[in-house]
Amino acid sequence: MTADVFSFEHVSVGDDAGHWRLHEAVGAIPDCGVTAIVGPSGSGKSTLLRCCNRLEAVSRGVVRFRGVDVATIEPLSLRRRVGMVFQRPTPFAGTGRDNLRVAAPDLSDDQAADLLAEVRLDASFLDRDAMRLSGGEAQRLCLARSLAAEPEVLLMDEVTSSVDPGTRVALEELARTCAGRGVRVLW
């Protein structure tokens, strides 16, 4: 039997006046493969993902990561284990290399180039200004940065929204590759 990587026990995010971005979410994410969370715009999908690594605090209920309440896990430690790639890319100032080394300070240039290759960027991106990349290039750099930390789980919040169709297919293939080597993916 497969354990749950995440479970949600009546999770709500909002205020006491009843303005909920997420209300009474109940369920579990199995500890295997790629899991897609689907629903209409505004239904709380992004909020739910953000609760998984404490970028959002729950107002009510409990989010568990491998059976442990995420509220009891130190946020930086949790975020290294549960990486996130956002809908809007968030590169940091500096080069591609600088961005990757935020997640893995001892990363060699060869390792960095391998990470970039995984997301279909060539090694020249190591020296490029991350703030001058196109939306799709920045998205792939941010994904490589998340992978550099070697997370157990990767949260992907609508990561294909700013990429071309070929890159979308590549990101979907990468999610399957990650899952195949043991990194759980919530998309």
Image (cartoon, grey):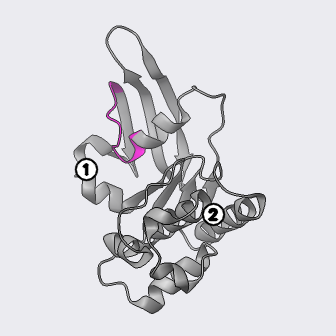
Instruction: Evaluate whether residue 99 shows in this view.
Output: yes
In the rendered view, does 103 fall on the left or right side of 153?
A: left
Spot occupied by residue 102 in the image (x, y as percentages of width and height): 32, 70
- Residue in front for this viewpoint, 78 or 61: 78
Q: Main secondary structure of the magenta part?
A: loop
Q: Is residue 77 magenta?
A: no
Query: What residue do we see at 50% from left, 29% from top?
Result: 26
- Residue in front for this viewpoint, 27 or 15: 15
Furthest-top residue in this view? 17
- Residue bounds of the magenta highlight: 51-60
On screen, residue 186 above or below 17: below
Residue receiving disc 1: 73
The label number, if any, that marks residue 175 in the structure image: 2
- Residue in front for this viewpoint, 85 or 36: 85
Spot occupied by residue 69 in the image (x, y as percentages of width and height): 31, 42
- Nearer the observer: mark 2 or 1; the answer is 2
Q: Secondary structure at mark 2?
A: helix
Q: Secondary structure at mark 1?
A: loop
Dot 2 crowding, Cα within 10 Å, few <14, some 14–19, many 20+: many
The label number, if any, that marks residue 13 in the structure image: none
- In what quadrant of the picture does the N terminus appear? bottom right
